[in-house]
Image: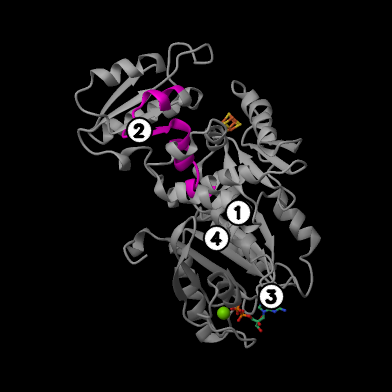
Amino acid sequence: MLETPKGLRLHIGIFGRRNSGKSTLMNALIGQSVSIVSDQPGTTTDPVEKTFELAPLGPVVFIDTAGLDDEGDLGALRIEKTRQVLERVDVALVVVDAGGMTATERDLMATLRAANTPFAIVFNKSDLGEPPAEQLAQLAAEAIETVSISAATGRGIDRVKEALFRQAPESSIEDPRLVGDLIGPGDLVVLVVPIDLGAPKGRLILPQVQTMRDILDSDAVGLMVKERELAAALARMSDKPRLVVCDSQVVNKVSADTPPDIRMTTFSILMARFKGDMIGLAEGAGAISRLKPGDKVLIAEACSHHALADDIGRVKIPRWLRQYAGGNLDIEVRSGKDFPEDLSSYALIVQCGGCTVTRKQILVRQYRAAQQGVPMTNYGMAISVSQGVIERALECFPAALDAYRRGMAGSAR
Ligand SMILES: Nc1nc2c(ncn2[C@@H]2O[C@H](COP(=O)(O)OP(=O)(O)O)[C@@H](O)[C@H]2O)c(=O)[nH]1
Ligand code: SF4
Ligand SMILES: [Mg+2]
């Protein structure tokens, strides 16, 4: 945490009127008392900063501020300080107490909008009463994210974190490398790409192109073959390749043709790391072995136009999962943004590869599943499990392999 320069951390400002519960919220988010809570309005005078590791965003800085409705000369000074904080935060939480929003919050929202600072409205003190319905409707119409919580009891704190992930700029989440960290300059990487009827005409698909680009960025050497030419190509090489990456469809043949001392993985596994938290997805893959007949499984497609590989999520994966469970499963498919709030009834979630959505969107889904204790994996991992090659495909990711085994044992969480 100390290694991240302060300037690069995501700064999250907590704003609102006096006594709305800003300090209580910050303490609840951090899980310790750093900010003084009091029913005496104006207790927080100077902005209080606290660095905190907020997975999956990494280290963030929370800034608790004085109320924006402070009074008197001193109050004006505090408001000025709070306004300065407004200028340097990347994301804001606007805390509103049970009574609902006033002109102060409206002003604040206008300021945040003008500064292009993303924010969510946090209606606090839900233990005392629900937020005014017309305000909720109005904010929804303006596409402003709202969360109703009780900072004092802790109810809804996870939803505030989720809102923060959603509002955080994409740039605040660092994209991991595809293969760059697995290879060094001069290393040889073999990419195995089947060219069958399903392959798009005259071109390669994005994961293949992105992997090739990352190999070039690493000053390494990339070589592409179809699965049928792999064995001959390997036989001709005087130096062993550092890594073999193949399409999931041919993983069995490639695994057989690649000597055990050569590391091997799939594009789907590389993409799982690029487009989500690989550790969580591997742990979720382990849970496949624990499925029982009658379990409810959610197949989550991130968009509604999964044209080519439609049968993977809707036909192939459900069929494999039923085989694993040894009986029928209650399989539900959801497309697009329709990812349920309440996941508690599912024994497993299988997310698509997420090619049309961002890494952040997948991370937010994984976060929600983890909060509710529901295992979540993705198509690529599930396919590797079904083909019996997951352990080999995860060998170059030891932490993910451990997570997979943990998931099988069910000792997760
Ligand atoms: N009932 C209730 N009281 C709360 C809640 N959150 C904060 N408070 C109380 O509201 C008062 C002001 O809280 P504080 O966090 O200091 O507000 P701030 O001025 O916005 O920082 C304190 O007495 C808190 O205990 C809540 O969720 N429910
Ligand atoms: S995001 Fe990509 S993988 Fe997911 S459903 Fe859409 S097309 Fe399919
Ligand atoms: Mg305070």
Looking at the image, tell me whether mark 1 or mark 3 is earlier in sequence order.
3
Up/down of 145 relative to 195, above or below = below
Q: Is residue 154 magenta?
A: no
Looking at the image, tell me whether mark 3 or mark 4 is earlier in sequence order.
4
What's the distance in space between the residues labelled 1 and 2, CA to CA? 28 Å
- Mark nearest the camera among 4 and 2 is 2
Q: Which residue is mark 3?
A: 153
Looking at the image, tell me whether mark 1 or mark 2 is earlier in sequence order.
2
| Type of amino acid under label 3 | Thr
Q: Secondary structure at mark 1?
A: loop
Residue 393's spot in the image, x, y percent?
Answer: 44, 36
- Mark nearest the camera among 1 and 3 is 1
What's the distance in space between the residues labelled 3 and 4, CA to CA? 30 Å
Residue 260: give its label: 2
Q: Going by the picture, which residue comes out furthest to the bottom? A: 40
Q: Residues at badges 1 and 2 in contact (C-beta under 8 Å)?
A: no
Up/down of 259 relative to 274, above or below = above
How busy is the neighbourhood of tag 3: few (under 14 within 10 Å), some, or many (20 plus)? few
Looking at the image, tell me whether mark 4 or mark 2 is earlier in sequence order.
4
Q: Which residues are magenta?
A: 253-280
What residue is rendered at 44% in x and 31% in y?
A: 267
Q: Which residue is mark 1?
A: 410
Mark 4 residue CB less than 8 A from any atom of ligand 1: no
Residue 126 appears in the picture as rendered: yes
Q: Which residue is mark 4?
A: 111
How busy is the neighbourhood of tag 1: few (under 14 within 10 Å), some, or many (20 plus)? some
Residue placed most toward the observer, 117 or 258 = 258
Residue 217: give its label: none
